[in-house]
Amino acid sequence: MKHYLLLSLAILSELAGTSAMKLSEGFTRLVPSVIFIIGYGLSFYLLALSLERIPVSTAYAIWAGVGTAGIAVIGVLAFEESLSPMGIGGIALIILGVILLHLSRG
């Protein structure tokens, strides 16, 4: 269970890093740029630690899928971006794919 906590923290770090990338305005703002670098560095480190017990296909699919869905929600809530019904469907399919991949591991 510890490794899924590490994976969850990796996802949160990725979300922070991606949000900071948006706020960095093309890396012209120092603080968001530094947060981006730290966020992604920490995310990859925690993801690597989670791979000690979680299969790479499962861990990466969860990291990427939840990260994609999470940043889409953050984009809508924090950055006033829009999300079409087709976009929502696409995110739902990503999440469904991650769930199916995880369940297929038995």
Image (cartoon, grey):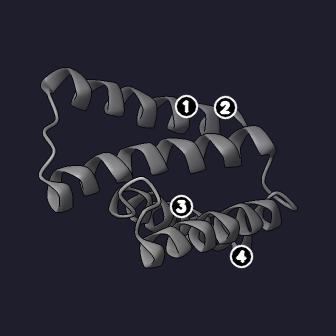
Q: Which mark is residue 14?
A: 3
What is the distance, in whole Å, between disc 3 and disc 2 at their CAs?
A: 26 Å
Q: How crowded is mark 3: few (under 14 residues within 10 Å), some or many (20 or more)?
A: many
Please indicate whether residue 44 sits to the left or right of residue 19 in the image.
right
Give amino acid for label 4.
Lys
Mark 2 or mark 4, whichever is nearer to me: 4
Q: Please tell me which residue is depicted at 62% across the width and 40% down the height of the picture.
A: 61
Give amino acid for label 1.
Leu
Regarding mark 4 in the picture, which secondary structure is present there?
Answer: helix
What is the distance, in whole Å, between disc 3 and disc 4 at their CAs?
A: 18 Å
The quarter of the picture where the N terminus appears is bottom right
Which residue is identified by label 2? 104
Ranked by sequence position, the earlier of labels 2 and 4 is 4
Mark 3 or mark 4, whichever is nearer to me: 3
Ranked by sequence position, the earlier of labels 1 and 3 is 3
What is the distance, in whole Å, between disc 1 and disc 3 at their CAs?
A: 23 Å
